[in-house]
């Protein structure tokens, strides 16, 4: 992990020789991630810089974001067991850990592998040359003073990093007491992590307006979300059924999907399970979730490809949208009047670009968010697809070629199937220890 942060070598953008067919999955995965980083730097990033992609959507990527181990984001109300969940996975405590019934984790903590166990302040963590968190500098000191890295020698962290978050509070404490935009920071992490674990417990089932806003920020990343009902051994079997139904009802009001989400039921702590009637069920559910987590390193290259293609499709729609808006602007005067007309008719402008370019409506950005940002931008400065900043159309041609040829070619080297983990010790429901009453 340290070499990702402090390495300063300039990346070589020339294509590497592909691994032989006899190469192991780890070699093939490294090759795919290395080539993805080169494709992004050479083809996508110049277009993002020209079109101010980071202003409208998400910060630009760096090489470390392709090479870093898979990340898991833990989100939920305070004291539902997020930090204890991490301790359960690691089998030990980690530097900077704080646990208690009150809101004890008052900061974002990136728990990563490091032989020299220590905590790293947020400013130092984000200023390192190849840090995957470098883009968080723009959130300012108010956030960086509430962000830190925790280097821990647990073997698990060689394969996956864990992001602990402050509990989502209710009312003014969430909106005002925190002097940074909590929702924006969580959304930044949601875009980059491989898995989002949304935790509840039987005694905190109500989804506040503040938590609802956080969950809505996961839009477009629903496939990453795993809902966990933690501390389930603290209620009886009958109570658990009622609690489960109440949680499903609450989630149905928030998650904008036609399918019913999977809720994992368990008790992630190092104590014996308290309720013998539900112990086999909890053990089986916990085993399923841990199997998902164990598979993350094997599937990380596939997820990186998926996220980059998703980003590229949004970038393509963004380019054509800016090109269309620029074409509507007058040549000499009346800029503000025309800009106001375009903003008021933005839904129609989206539909026009969608039909004219043969794009999917699902590739377009959120309408209201785009309008709110576009109000502050000069439309006459938007780059034309055929203009000099877009290399007279060659930039978009390269983007299409990368999407249609280069990335599909890389997918031939993606690992197939699930990799067995010889070090894994799955939970066996028949061997569960239950606390004797």
Image (spheres, grey):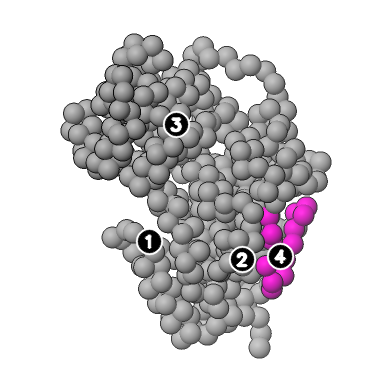
Rendered position, 404 above or below 107: above
- Disc 1 target residue: 255
Tell me the element at label 1.
Answer: loop
Residue at the image position 78 percent from the left and 52 percent from the top: 95
Q: Earlier in the sequence, mark 4 or mark 1?
A: 4
CA gap, disc 1 to disc 3?
A: 27 Å
Q: Which mark identifies residue 104?
A: 4
- Disc 2 target residue: 173
Q: Residues within 10 Å of mark 4 (few under 14, many from 20)?
A: some
Tell me the element at label 3.
Answer: helix
Residue at the image position 46 percent from the left and 59 percent from the top: 213
Q: Quadrant of the N terminus?
A: top right
Q: Residues within 10 Å of mark 2 (few under 14, many from 20)?
A: few
Q: For this view, does 420 lie left or right of residue 101?
A: left
Q: Earlier in the sequence, mark 2 or mark 4?
A: 4
Q: For this view, does 398 lie left or right of residue 160?
A: left
Q: Which mark identifies residue 53?
A: 3
Span colored in magenta: 94-107
CA gap, disc 3 to disc 2?
A: 32 Å
CA gap, disc 2 to disc 4?
A: 14 Å
């Amino acid at each position: 992990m340290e070499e990702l942060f402090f390495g300063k070598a300039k990346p070589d953008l020339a294509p590497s020789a592909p691994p032989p067919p006899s190469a192991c999955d780890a070699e093939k995965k490294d090759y795919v991630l290395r080539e993805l980083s080169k494709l992004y730097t050479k083809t996508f990033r110049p277009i993002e810089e020209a079109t101010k992609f980071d202003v409208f959507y998400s910060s630009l990527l760096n090489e470390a974001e392709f090479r870093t181990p898979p990340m898991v984001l833990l989100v939920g109300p305070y004291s539902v067991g997020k930090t204890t969940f991490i301790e359960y996975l690691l089998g030990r405590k980690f530097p900077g850990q704080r646990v208690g019934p009150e809101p004890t984790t008052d900061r974002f903590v990136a728990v990563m592998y490091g032989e020299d166990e220590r905590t790293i302040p947020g400013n130092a963590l984000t200023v390192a040359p190849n840090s995957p968190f470098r883009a968080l500098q723009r959130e300012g000191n108010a956030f960086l003073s509430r962000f830190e890295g925790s280097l821990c020698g647990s073997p698990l962290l060689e394969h996956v990093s864990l992001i602990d978050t402050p509990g989502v509070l209710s009312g003014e404490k969430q909106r005002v007491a925190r002097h940074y935009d909590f929702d924006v920071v969580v959304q930044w992490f949601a875009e980059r992590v491989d898995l989002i674990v949304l935790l509840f417990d039987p005694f905190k089932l109500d989804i506040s307006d503040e938590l609802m806003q956080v969950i809505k920020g996961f839009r477009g990343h629903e496939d990453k979300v795993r809902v966990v009902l933690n501390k389930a051994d603290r209620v009886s079997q009958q109570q658990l059924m009622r609690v489960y139904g109440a949680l499903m009802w609450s989630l149905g009001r928030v998650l904008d999907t036609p399918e019913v989400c999977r809720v994992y039921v368990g008790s992630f702590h190092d104590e014996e399970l308290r309720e013998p009637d539900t112990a086999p069920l909890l053990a089986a559910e916990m085993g399923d979730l841990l199997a998902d987590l164990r598979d993350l390193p094997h599937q990380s290259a596939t997820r990186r490809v998926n996220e980059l293609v998703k980003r590229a499709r949004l970038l393509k729609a963004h380019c054509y949208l800016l090109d269309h808006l620029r074409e509507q602007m007058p040549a000499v005067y009346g800029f503000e009047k025309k800009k106001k007309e375009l903003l008021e008719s933005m839904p129609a402008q989206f539909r026009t670009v969608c039909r004219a370019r043969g794009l999917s409506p699902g590739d377009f950005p959120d309408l209201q968010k785009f309008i709110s940002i576009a109000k502050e931008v000069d439309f006459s400065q938007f780059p034309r697809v055929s203009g000099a900043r877009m290399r007279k159309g060659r930039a978009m041609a390269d983007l299409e070629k990368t999407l249609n040829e280069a990335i599909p070619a890389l997918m031939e080297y993606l690992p197939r199937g699930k990799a067995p983990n010889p070090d894994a010790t799955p939970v066996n429901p028949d061997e569960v220890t239950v606390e004797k009453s």
